[in-house]
Amino acid sequence: MKKPQEFVACAERLKALADSDRLRIVNLLIAGERNVGDISAALSEDIVKISHHLGILRRAGILTSQKQGRFVVYALNPLVFVPADGAGCEPQLEFGCCRLELEQD
């Protein structure tokens, strides 16, 4: 049986995804890591807005960030992201209490 704190962590991750802009960011990062400027340009959104959403997703454990030179690069956290397997299985976010299937654009 799952522990209560596992459900709390899962709920926090689901709350972080409860925004259309954050879902768009996650969908974009399925293809691989990007910096905030790349994400902003790809989604035609302001860098400040994208930075805010990236912080929420990172704090929820959905994204990782790594400094590369003068940029911070964001990627889906490999502890929760399950890439497509090539055998018809779509990429997924695995939270323990639930799993979300993602569509690739």
Image (tube, helix red, strand yellow):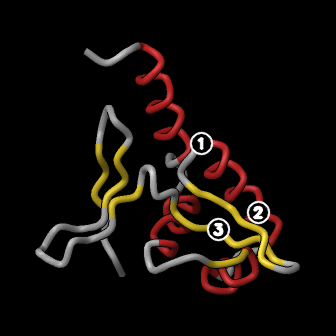
Q: Which of the two discs, 1 and 2, labels the residue nearer the N terminus?
A: 2
The percent coordinates of residue 44 (x first, y second) are 67, 82
Q: Could you say where residue 94 lies in the image, as x and y percent from the top left?
A: 34, 47
Residue at 45% across, 70% down: 27
- Residue type of the residue flagged with mark 1: Ala
Residue at (12%, 73%) from the top-left corner? 88
Q: Nearer the viewer, residue 16 or 80?
A: 80
Residue 3's spot in the image, x, y percent? 38, 15
- Identify residue type, mark 3: Tyr
Quick one: SS at disc 3? strand
- Image quarter (top left, top right, bottom left or bottom right) of the N terminus: top left
Separation of residues labelled 2 and 3 (CA atoms): 10 Å
How many angstroms separate mark 1 from mark 2 (CA)?
Answer: 14 Å
What residue lies at 76% left-to-right and 63% top-to-bottom?
Answer: 51
Q: Which residue is mark 3?
A: 74
Q: Which residue is mark 1?
A: 60
Circle nearer the N terminus (3, 1)? 1
Cα separation, mark 3 vs mark 1, equals: 13 Å
Eyeballing the image, is 29 above or below 3? below
Q: Is residue 91 left or right of residue 40?
A: left
Q: How many labels, in total?
A: 3
